[in-house]
Amino acid sequence: AQRVTQPEKLLSVFKGAPVELKCNYSYSGSPELFWYVQYSRQRLQLLLRHISRESIKGFTADLNKGETSFHLKKPFAQEEDSAMYYCALPPRVQETSGSRLTFGEGTQLTVNP
Amino acid sequence: DAGVIQSPRHEVTEMGQEVTLRCKPISGHNSLFWYRQTMMRGLELLIYFNNNVPIDDSGMPEDRFSAKMPNASFSTLKIQPSEPRDSAVYFCASSYRRHQEKLFFGSGTQLSVL
């Protein structure tokens, strides 16, 4: 069965330090993975998707099929990056009547001044 | 568009009482999802609808939970009777079928069952 694991519930770094939020998955085939973010008092929202190979707010995520990982990275963390981050995986087979994402347990990132 | 609208924002109730959570998806979206967020389990999908039809309710924890979507602009999640372990933040999200992976979330309902 497909699964997404975020091994760290809490992660704390200092401003300007590199940050890496870990995400591992189990999936048959080539997955398309996503990172969602929830800032304090804001709604959960899509941060980035690996298929677009984009950098959002300085964050990037590379799919590593060998390690079955999709870690979220940023070279220099900022205080405004403090938030809850969720890694997400769609179902293996796109259902014809809607799809649903499987979310990891989430990692609460705190960037200290 | 105001986005996905959930009500109430906070609900405090006593064990055994019925709780009804409400959701208005974004106009034009045809998929609607109910999630539960807890520290221990993160985000869990409870049920989702497509074109107002329940597709997968395997995440609904018990018969005490039920969800309906009588029309494209309204859905409810009901817990009857409520228990303290139901305390969590309940999120509603909607998406447009052509962009199924991009979910738009509501602000959530913080439920506390005493």
Image: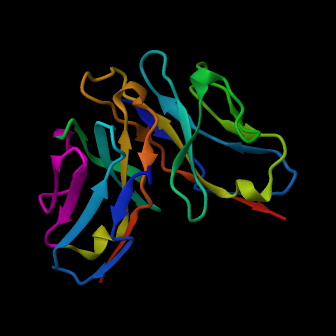
Examine the rendering and report whether any part of residue A67 can be seen: no
Question: In the rendered view, would you say B40 is above or below B57?
Answer: below
Seen at 41% across and 58% down, the residue is B37
> Which percent across, then down, holds residue A94?
33, 21
Question: In the rendered view, would you say A28 is above or below B53?
Answer: above
Q: How many labels does the image show?
A: 0
> Which percent across, then down, holds residue B73?
25, 49
Where on the picture, by quarter, is residue B23?
A: bottom left
Q: Is residue B57 magenta?
A: yes
Q: As rendered, which of A84 and B39 lies closer to the eye?
A: A84
Q: Along the horizontal axis of the image, is B60 left or right of A111?
A: left
- Which quadrant is the C terminus of chain B positioned in? bottom left
* Highlighted magenta segment, given as a residue range: B53-81
Seen at 16% across and 79% down, the residue is B16
Question: In the rendered view, would you say A96 is above or below B89?
Answer: above
> Which percent across, then down, holds residue A100?
35, 35
Q: As rendered, which of A14 and A9 lies closer to the eye?
A: A14
Question: In the rendered view, would you say B34 is above or below B8?
Answer: above
